[in-house]
């Protein structure tokens, strides 16, 4: 697993740096050739979700964050207020984030990525599961304790246009978390806001400007400065560049990487753009209909995707090299509703390899290679 990085962060233009983003890909035909027999010949062990994370992936350090069996269901009510069902937005999601690493979360729109990020931060109360941060389960904390612990985890939002109050000077926006957490005196807070502004590429006197005076990329940099105000250890970045022009995306990604290097931050990086995730993440988790169906170190996941859904996702990524031909794995069927997810493996209605057992039995999570977990009957012992 690649937890350590080179001393210098990679400066990358996401459009043109194909060396970094798109090493020689496997064709989708190759990908589909991974048959059940071939995969069964690998050493596959059962992976208990509650096993000590450090033992599961053979890592030396303890995780900063351990998410276990996280669940978030949203009640659906009739016009008269009667509960008529649940949107099962997140179901039994487990993963770890280590100090200084970036864990990427990918999947189609609506699969539960943002809900996972919000539930981890306790911005929305999880329906079930645990979120361990430095030895304490955040889901059990309340009031002042929760507020204090939460200051270690901050969020960078997708939309820089709506995440800043248009009536507030940007300096105040950056200072606000310090104010809420009663950190420092007024002048210390202002000084810190100015220094953070400088860190993300502005002049200190721009403290007095309003959000409308800045472009989208600039506002996202202000959002990053705000997220750093409380000196968190973990940033949850929810599609932080998807609302930006491609030319600006690289600047923001580079800034996030530099800041991670300087401060040893960990990132939970949510995105639907696989190229961005491939570039920035050390490990990647793939979500489908509220579940985490596969997770692995980034190179392993992109080089050897095991779950049929991951294989189809990766086959849809465009390759910048016109000489490389790639067959796209087109999935059949509609994306099912999280209000009424399919029984057994939730992917069985669209999976080209579905077997009888897939329709009724939820697959176990198994470890197919060190740190490579997959939830699919094709890889069962
Ligand atoms: N507050 C909410 N109330 C009801 N359903 C919600 C709410 N927030 C999200 N959902 C539903 O939960 C599912 C997952 O949403 P989300 O986490 O936003 O997905 P993603 O970020 O992967 O696009 C979707 O079906 C979405 O409609
Ligand atoms: S468990 Fe069955 S339906 Fe689900 S992904 Fe694996 S083969 Fe396909
Ligand atoms: Mg989202």
Image (cartoon, rainbow, N blue to C red):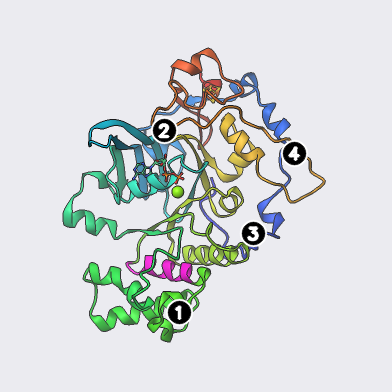
* Residue 205 drawn above or below residue 124: below
> Residue 321: x percent and y percent?
77, 50
Mark 3 residue element: loop
* Residue 328 drawn above or below residue 21: above
> Residue 33: x percent and y percent?
70, 26
Q: CA distance from mark 4 to mark 3?
A: 20 Å
- Tell me, yes or no, if residue 9 can be seen here: no
The foreground one among 373 and 354 is 354
Q: Is mark 4 within 8 Å of ligand 2?
A: no
Q: Is mark 2 within 8 Å of ligand 1?
A: yes
- Kindly identify which residue carries mark 1: 198
- Kindly identify which residue carries mark 2: 338
| Dot 1 or dot 4, earlier in sequence | 1
In the displayed structure image, the side of residue 279 where residue 228 appears, left or right: left
Location of residue 330 (image quadrant): top right
Q: CA distance from mark 1 to mark 2?
A: 44 Å
Location of residue 148 (image quadrant): bottom left
> Residue 279: x percent and y percent?
59, 54
The segment highlighted magenta reads 219-230
| Dot 4 or dot 3, earlier in sequence | 3
Q: Residues within 10 Å of mark 4 (few under 14, many from 20)?
A: some
- Tell me, yes or no, if residue 180 can be seen here: yes
As drawn, which residue projects farthest toward the front?
Answer: 79
Which numbered tag is attached to residue 14? 3
Which numbered tag is attached to residue 326? 4
| Dot 2 or dot 3, earlier in sequence | 3
């Amino acid at each position: 697993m690649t937890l350590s990085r080179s001393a210098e962060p990679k400066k990358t233009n996401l459009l043109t740096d194909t060396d970094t983003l798109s090493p020689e890909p496997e064709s989708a035909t190759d990908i589909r050739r991974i048959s059940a027999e071939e995969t069964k010949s690998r050493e596959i062990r059962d992976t208990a979700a509650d096993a000590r994370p450090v033992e599961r992936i053979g890592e030396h350090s303890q995780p900063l964050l351990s998410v276990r069996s996280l669940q978030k269901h949203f009640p659906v009510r009739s016009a008269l207020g009667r509960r008529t069902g649940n949107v099962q937005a997140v179901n039994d999601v487990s993963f770890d984030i280590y100090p200084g690493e970036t864990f990427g979360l990918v999947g189609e729109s609506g699969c539960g990525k943002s809900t996972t990020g919000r539930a981890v931060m306790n911005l929305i109360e999880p329906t079930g599961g645990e979120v361990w941060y430095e030895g304490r389960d955040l889901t059990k904390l309340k009031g002042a304790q929760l507020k204090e612990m939460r200051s270690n985890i901050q969020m960078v939002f997708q939309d820089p246009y709506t995440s800043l109050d248009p009536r507030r000077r940007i300096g105040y926006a950056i200072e606000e978390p310090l104010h809420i957490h009663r950190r420092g005196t007024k002048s210390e807070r202002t000084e810190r806001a100015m220094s953070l502004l400088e860190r993300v590429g502005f002049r200190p006197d721009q403290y007095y400007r309003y959000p409308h005076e800045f472009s989208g990329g600039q506002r996202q940099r202000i959002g990053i400065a705000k997220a750093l105000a409380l000196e968190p250890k973990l940033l949850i970045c929810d599609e932080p560049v998807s609302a930006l022009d491609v030319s600006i995306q690289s600047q923001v990604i580079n800034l996030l990487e530099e800041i991670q290097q300087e401060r040893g931050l960990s990132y939970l990086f949510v995105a639907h753009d696989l190229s961005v995730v491939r570039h920035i993440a050390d490990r990647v988790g793939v979500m489908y209909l509220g579940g985490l169906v596969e997770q692995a170190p980034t190179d392993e996941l992109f080089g050897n995707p095991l779950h049929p859904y991951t294989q189809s996702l990766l086959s849809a990524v465009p390759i910048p090299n016109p000489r490389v031909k790639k067959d796209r794995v087109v999935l059949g069927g509609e994306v099912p509703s999280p209000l009424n997810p399919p029984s057994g493996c939730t992917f069985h209605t669209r999976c080209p390899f579905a077997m009888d057992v897939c329709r009724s039995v939820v697959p176990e999570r198994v470890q197919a290679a060190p740190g490579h977990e997959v939830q699919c009957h094709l890889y069962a012992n």
